[in-house]
Amino acid sequence: MSEAGFSETGLKRLRETMTGFVSAGTVPGLVLALSRGEDLVVEAIGSMTPGGAPIGPDAIFRVTSMTRPVTAVAALQLIGTGRLGLDEPVGRLLPELVGRPVLRELAGPVEDTVPARRPVSVRDLLTFRAGFGMILAPPGEYPILAAEQALELRSVGPPAPGPALAPDEWLRRMGTLPLMDQPGTQWRYSTSSQILGVLISRATGQSLESYCAEHIFGPLGMTGTWFWVPDGELGRLVPAYDQAGGELVPVDDGGQWARPRPFADGGAGLVCTVADYLTFGRMLLNGGMLGGTRVLAPEWVAAMTTNQLSDEQRYTAGPILDGRGWGFGVSVLDGPDGPRGYGWSGGYGTSWLNDPATGLAGVLGTQLFASAGGADLEAGFWAAVYDALDG
């Protein structure tokens, strides 16, 4: 074992902990990947389905919201080369969003608006302060949610299924709605990453999936990462489950990751192996470079992984952010208790954390849709990972 790596006894306890979740029926199987110093661990535990074939380390997971940091890196690459400006209004490339008014009251009629005090900027998209996103309430309680639903934008809820519209039509419809908040004032989850994906495509003249493959996945050797699973690899895509009454219930995702879709969702569209996502995490932990390949300038990695929100914004963001900080497309853990670093999780049972203070990068892939059981599994995993640190 290398200096400042993982303790063998700690790794044994980690395996026992995760095997316990599988044996208890919390989840059929999982894959974990960790790195620290020269130590690299990738392990698969359990099966693809209850009582079925073993899950392999090359299993493919729907990483859903863990797509957002990847999209942020793509945008920051373009900012670094001058093709986008961090504080430029998005209207240069997204004219559909120019002049959008703002709701006078969040729960008010969509026609009752006031002018926006300033345009939406690229920074607003990266920090999720672009004025549109989730409201954790039934659509009937908020006319703006009902209007979003009627337009089939699928921008304020879980990715099951994702938008069925082509990007230009999706953005045209988005531009017919008012903003929920004045730009730059309120953190709201989800929609900003989708808009950012369209912006990247227009700035490059490439589809989002093509740009990411050429400038992120290819250079890093992430050969098991796509916006849909190629035909020959579908057998590696894990089934997804939810918990109901303590039982595992298969989740029907509509087969949306089994075929190309008109909308490459920059917020929740990726499928990925756990080892591939660890590679992405290690690149960021190493200041934007891995194996001699630079993907992002170190100053942009630093900005991405530093909290960009005011205290009021982070503590009024609601339970999704839960008081944490937010950088550019990534959550920042900077409180006095617990791990310090950055990362994010996906609603289909995946989790990622980089901890620069300890040199740790870790990823967990499970098949369990976000639920109480999934939260317990994730918490147990990270507690066991920190127990396994050596030195």
Image (spheres, rainbow, N blue to C red):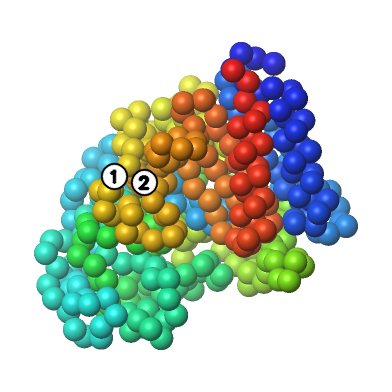
Distance from disc 2 to disc 1, alpha carbons, whole Å, reads 7 Å
Q: Nearer the viewer, residue 10 or 130?
A: 10
Which residue corresponds to the image point at 36% horizontal and 46% vertical from the top-left? 325
Residue 21, x across and y down, in percent: 76, 50
Q: Residue beneath label 2, please?
A: 325
- Going by the numbered disc 1, the residue's amino acid type is Gln
Q: Quadrant of residue 94?
A: bottom left
Q: Is residue 144 left or right of residue 330?
A: left
Residue 265 appears in view: yes
Q: Quadrant of residue 6?
A: top right
Q: Residue beneath label 1, please?
A: 308
Q: Is residue 92 left or right of residue 351?
A: left
| As drawn, 239 above or below 344 | below
| As drawn, 1 above or below 381 | above
Residue 294 appears in view: no
Which residue corresponds to the image point at 44% horizontal and 59% vertical from the top-left? 320
Q: Provide the secondary structure element on which disc 2 rests.
A: strand
Pointer 2 with pointer 1, Cβ within 8 A: yes
Among numbered discs 2 and 1, the one appearing first in the sequence: 1
Which residue corresponds to the image point at 19% horizontal and 84% vertical from the top-left? 112
Q: Provide the secondary structure element on which disc 1 rests.
A: loop
Residue 261, x across and y down, in percent: 53, 66
Q: Is residue 265 left or right of residue 187?
A: right
Q: Nearer the viewer, residue 183 or 95?
A: 183
| As drawn, 97 above or below 307 | below
Kindly identify which numbered label has been placed on residue 132: none
The mark lying in front, picked from 2 and 1, is 2
- Going by the numbered disc 2, the residue's amino acid type is Gly
- Residue at the limit of the structure toward the front, as seen here: 337
Which residue corresponds to the image point at 28% horizontal and 54% vertical from the top-left? 313
